[in-house]
Amino acid sequence: MINVTDKAKERIAELRTEEGHSPSHNIRVAVKGGGCSGLMYDLLFDDKLTDTDEVFEDKGVKVIVDKKSILYLLGTTLDFSDGLNGKGFQFINPNATRTCGCGESFSI
């Protein structure tokens, strides 16, 4: 399960409108190699599903995760921060044993 906070839900709706995406465009979250901790999050709008995708829905937001990434992301909460410490989406991942200072990469 991937959870979505109210702030993340609001920002996703704003971005969908700003970027001209239709309501059929869901959020795709993936994990890729890279970053200073070894793994990086990838977040984008997507309207296509593959046979190996899992779809989670929280607060009306559908989140698509590919089969390879699901093991890294189970139990993760997607949040959005617009505070003094930075603005952007944040991943609260209980599986991560280490994260980098920027919050965009992690290791298991």
Image (spheres, rainbow, N blue to C red):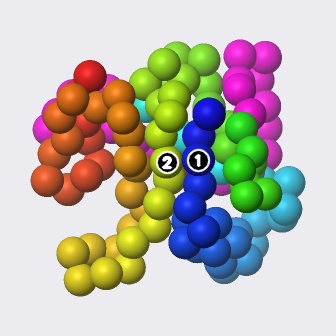
Eyeballing the image, is 44 above or below 7? above
Q: Is residue 42 visible?
A: yes
Mark nearer the N terminus (1 vs 2): 1
For label 1, the SS is strand
Say which mark, if any, is on residue 88. Answer: none
Residue 1 location, x and y as percent?
62, 34
Classify residue 70 by image quadrant.
top right
Eyeballing the image, is 86 above or below 25? below
Classify residue 54 by image quadrant.
top right
For label 2, the SS is strand
Q: Over which residues does the magenta segment extend?
A: 33-55
Residue 100 location, x and y as percent?
16, 45
Residue 24 location, x and y as percent?
85, 54
> Which quadrant does the C terminus fall into?
top left
Q: Residue placed at 71% from the left, 16% from the top?
A: 52
Marks 1 and 2: CB-CB under 8 Å? yes
Say which mark, if any, is on residue 77. Answer: 2
Q: Which residue is mark 1?
A: 3
Is 43 inside the magenta-drawn segment? yes
Q: Residue placed at 63% from the left, 74% from the top?
A: 10
Residue 15 location, x and y as percent?
62, 72
Is 36 inside the magenta-drawn segment? yes
